[in-house]
C-alpha cells in the first residue's frame, strides 16, 4: 500500500516534468504530416524510410495542408519546403539571410575546401564573379562543344557500336555515361583526358556478361600506359600532359572521396568526426584518397602554369582561372568589393578547390540527367518517336553519316542543338521527375517569417525539396506524375522555360547553376546522337532504385540491351 503511494507521488511529479521537457523540445508541435516522437523527432521514420526517402517525403507533402513542413531530427530543426514562393524567398529576395552556413561547411571541407560550392560571402562572390566571366565567353562554349563532339563521335558511339556488334547481353548504360561525363568534365576543367570511356573495356565487360559498373580504374589501367594512347580521340585543343598513371590514380581517388563525403550525411555528425580523428574506417580511406587527389591537383596546377608561361594555348577552366589570377597570395576574406579582376589573387590552394568543385558539379549531374531521360524515352515510345521526328526535321536533306568511319561517327552541330525544342522539353520534364540534385539546404542566419507565415529561428536548416516539388499537384497540376514533355511547349512547339523558383533543378537566384547552358548542350548532343543511332531496350520490369547522395543516380545502374536503329541507316 505504501509502495503504491510512493509510485503515485513519483508519477505525479515525473509525468508533468517529462511533458514539460517534451513540450520544450523542438520535436513538439511539428506540422501535421511530419510525425515526430519525443526527443528523437522524426529520426525513426527517416531510418525506416531511408530506402525510399524521396518518395516518402512526397507522401508527407501530399498529406500536409502546407507546402512547408517542420521536421526535427534529434535537436536539429529542418524546415522543408516545396512552395515556389518560399523558394523565391530563400534563394532570391532574402538571399543573404539564407547562406549555406557553418553546419554544411565541414561535410565538404576536406574534399572541396573553400571551393565555390562550399563557401559563402566574399569568397563565394569572388569565385562567382570570375567563373561567371569565364562561363559567358563564346570561346568556352566552343571548347565544350569540341570536347563533347570528340568524345561522342570518337568514344561513346563507337563503344556502343562495339557492344551492339558483339553481344545481346545487358549493359549498364549509366556506368558508360558516368565515364563519358568524367572524361568530358576533366577535359573541360584541367585540359587532360582520363580516357575512362574506352570501347575495348565496354566489349570486355559485355563479353563477361557483367551488367554492373565497368571497371575503369583497376590496376591494369594504371600499369598499361600504352593502351591509353591507342584509344586517344582527336582532342580539340592543346592539352596538359599528365602521366597516365597519375590521372588514373586521381580518377579512382576522386570517386572514392566523393562517395565517402556523401556518406557523411547519412550518419550522425559525431560518428564521422570521431572516425576522422581516430583515422579509422571510411575516414581513413577518405584521407588516403585525398592525398592522391591533392598530389594530382598540385601537379596539374604547376604544369598548367608552366604551359601558360611557355605561351601554350590552353582553353580549359584551370588555365582561364590562372590567367585571371594576378599573384599567388591567399585571397583575403574581405576581397568582395575589389574591382572586376583588378588585383585578383587566387592561391594554389583555392585553385585546387575550384578545380575539384567544377569536376563535382559537372560529372554525376549530367550523367544522371542523360540516364533518366534515356530510360524514360525507352518506356515512352510515343515521346521517343517525337524526338526522332524532330531530329529528322532538323537534319532535313543533310546527309547524316552515322556509319562508323574509322574511329569517328558524326554528331550534331550547335545550330542543330539550338533547334531541338522538343528534346529540351524532354530533358526538362525528365529532370522535373528525377532531378539530378534532389534537394538543397540553407541555414537561417537570423529569425524570419516565410511568405506562408512559417516562423524561422536563427540556426534552423531550411531546405527545398526539388524532388517533391516536381511531383506536387499543387505546383504542377493533377497530371504531375505523368511524363509529358508537351507541358513545356507553346502552341508553336517552342520551348517555354518554367520559373526557376517553381523548377529549382539548377537552383535559382544569385547562386543559380553556372553550367546550366553547357549541361543542356551536352545532354542534348548525347541523347540526340544515341537515340538517333540506337534503340535501348530496358530490362523488363525495371524500376530504378534512387540513390541518396550528392546527386541522384540509379543505385543499380540502367541495364539495357542495344539495337541499331535500322530505319535511320538509310
Ligand atoms: C544536369 C546537370 C546539372 C545540374 C542539375 C546542376 C545543378 C546545380 C545545382 C542544384 C546547383 C546548386 C548547388 C548548391 O549550391 O548546393 C549548382 C551549382 C553549380 N553548378 Fe551546376 N548542375 C549541373 C551541371 C553543371 C555543370 C556541367 C557545371 C560546370 C561545368 C556546373 C557548375 C556549377 C557551379 C560552378 C555551381 C555553383 C554556383 C554557385 O554556388 O554560385 N553545373 N548546379
Image (tube, grey):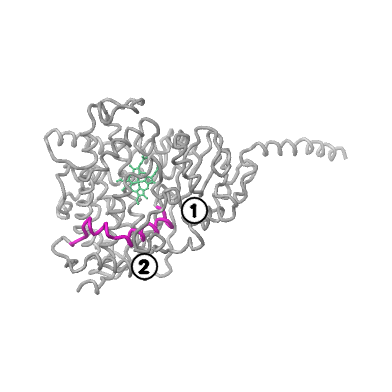
Report x, y in % for residue 403. Answer: 17, 67
Question: In 3D space, how far apart are the residues under numbered discs 1 and 2 (Cα atoms)?
Answer: 24 Å
- Viewer-proximal residue among 7 and 422: 422
- Viewer-proximal residue among 222 and 500: 500
Instruction: Give the residue drawn at x 19%, y 58%.
Output: 154
The segment highlighted magenta reads: 409-435
Report x, y in % for residue 346. Answer: 27, 30
Label the magenta part by its dominant secondary structure: helix
For residue 257, side relative to residue 311 (left or right): right
> Circles 1 and 2: CB distance less than 8 Å?
no
For residue 369, side relative to residue 477 (left or right): left
Q: Which residue extends farthest left?
A: 310
Instruction: Give the residue drawn at x 66%, y 36%.
Output: 24
Compared with 327, 250 (above or below) is below
Can the viewer see residue 292 in this picture?
Answer: no
- Viewer-proximal residue among 406 and 522: 522
Q: Within 10 angstroms of label 1, few (less than 14), some, or many (20 or more) residues?
A: many
Query: How many badges with numbers are in the image?
Result: 2
Q: Nearer the viewer, mark 1 or mark 2?
A: 2
- Quarter residue 189 falls in: top left
Can the viewer see residue 273 in this picture?
Answer: yes
Mark 1 residue's CB less than 8 Å from ligand 1:
no
The residue pinned by badge 1 equals: 468
Q: Which residue extends farthest right?
A: 1
Ligand 1 shows up in which quadrant of the image? top left
Q: Which mark is residue 25?
A: none
Mark 2 residue's CB less than 8 Å from ligand 1:
no
Q: Which mark is residue 383?
A: 2
- Quarter residue 26 falls in: top right
Amino acid at each position: 500500500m505504501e509502495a503504491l503511494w510512493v509510485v503515485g507521488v513519483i508519477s505525479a511529479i515525473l509525468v508533468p516534468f517529462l511533458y514539460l521537457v517534451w513540450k520544450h523540445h523542438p520535436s513538439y508541435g511539428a506540422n501535421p504530416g511530419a510525425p515526430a516522437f519525443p526527443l528523437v523527432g522524426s529520426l525513426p521514420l527517416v531510418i525506416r524510410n531511408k530506402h525510399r526517402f524521396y518518395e516518402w517525403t512526397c507522401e508527407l507533402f501530399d498529406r500536409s495542408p502546407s507546402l512547408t513542413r517542420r521536421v526535427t531530427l534529434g535537436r536539429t530543426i529542418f524546415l522543408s519546403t516545396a512552395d515556389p514562393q518560399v523558394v523565391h524567398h530563400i534563394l532570391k529576395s532574402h538571399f543573404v539571410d539564407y547562406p549555406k552556413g557553418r553546419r554544411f561547411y565541414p561535410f565538404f571541407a576536406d574534399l572541396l575546401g573553400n571551393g565555390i560550392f562550399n563557401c559563402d560571402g566574399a569568397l563565394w562572390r569572388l569565385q562567382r564573379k570570375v567563373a561567371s566571366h569565364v562561363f559567358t565567353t563564346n570561346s568556352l562554349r566552343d571548347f565544350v562543344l569540341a570536347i563533347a563532339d570528340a568524345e561522342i563521335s570518337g568514344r561513346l558511339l563507337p563503344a556502343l557500336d562495339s557492344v551492339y556488334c558483339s553481344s545481346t547481353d545487358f549493359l549498364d548504360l549509366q556506368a558508360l555515361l558516368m565515364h563519358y561525363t568524367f572524361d568530358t568534365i576533366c577535359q573541360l576543367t584541367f585540359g587532360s583526358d582520363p580516357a575512362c570511356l574506352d570501347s575495348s573495356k565496354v566489349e570486355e565487360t559485355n563479353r563477361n556478361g557483367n551488367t554492373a559498373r565497368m571497371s575503369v580504374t583497376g590496376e591494369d589501367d594504371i600499369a598499361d600506359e600504352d593502351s591509353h594512347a591507342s584509344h586517344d580521340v582527336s582532342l580539340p585543343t592543346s592539352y596538359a600532359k599528365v602521366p597516365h598513371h597519375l590521372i588514373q590514380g586521381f580518377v579512382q581517388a576522386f570517386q572514392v572521396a566523393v562517395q565517402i563525403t556523401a556518406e557523411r550525411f547519412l550518419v550522425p555528425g559525431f560518428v564521422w568526426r570521431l572516425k576522422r580523428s581516430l583515422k579509422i574506417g571510411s575516414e581513413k580511406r577518405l584521407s588516403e584518397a585525398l592525398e592522391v587527389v591533392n598530389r594530382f591537383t598540385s601537379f596539374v596546377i604547376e604544369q598548367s602554369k608552366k604551359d601558360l608561361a611557355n605561351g601554350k594555348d590552353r582553353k580549359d577552366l584551370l588555365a582561364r582561372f590562372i590567367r585571371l589570377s594576378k599573384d599567388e597570395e591567399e585571397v583575403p576574406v574581405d576581397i568582395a568589393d575589389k574591382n572586376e579582376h583588378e588585383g585578383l589573387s587566387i592561391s594554389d590552394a583555392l585553385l585546387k578547390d575550384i578545380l575539384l568543385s567544377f569536376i563535382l558539379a559537372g560529372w554525376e549531374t549530367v550523367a544522371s540527367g542523360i540516364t533518366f531521360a534515356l530510360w524514360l524515352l525507352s518506356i515512352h515510345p510515343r515521346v521517343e518517336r517525337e524526338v526522332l521526328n524532330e531530329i529528322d526535321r532538323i537534319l532535313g536533306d543533310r546527309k547524316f553519316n552515322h556509319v562508323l568511319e574509322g574511329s569517328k561517327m558524326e554528331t550534331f552541330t550547335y545550330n542543330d542543338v539550338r533547334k531541338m525544342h522538343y528534346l529540351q522539353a524532354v530533358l526538362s520534364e525528365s529532370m522535373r521527375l528525377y532531378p539530378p540534385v534532389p534537394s538543397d539546404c540553407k541555414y537561417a542566419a537570423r529569425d524570419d517569417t516565410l511568405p506562408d507565415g512559417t516562423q524561422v529561428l536563427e540556426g534552423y536548416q531550411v531546405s527545398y525539396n526539388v524532388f517533391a516539388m516536381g511531383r506536387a499537384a499543387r505546383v504542377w497540376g493533377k497530371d504531375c506524375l505523368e511524363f509529358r514533355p508537351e507541358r513545356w511547349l507553346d502552341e508553336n512547339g517552342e520551348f517555354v522555360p518554367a520559373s526557376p523558383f517553381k523548377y529549382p533543378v539548377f537552383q535559382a537566384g544569385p547562386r543559380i547553376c553556372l553550367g546550366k547552358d553547357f549541361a543542356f548542350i551536352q545532354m542534348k548532343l548525347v541523347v540526340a546522337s544515341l537515340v538517333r543511332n540506337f534503340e535501348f531496350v530496358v530490362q523488363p520490369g525495371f524500376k530504378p532504385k534512387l540513390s541518396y547522395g550528392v546527386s541522384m543516380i540509379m543505385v543499380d545502374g540502367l541495364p539495357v540491351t542495344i539495337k541499331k536503329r535500322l530505319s535511320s541507316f538509310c
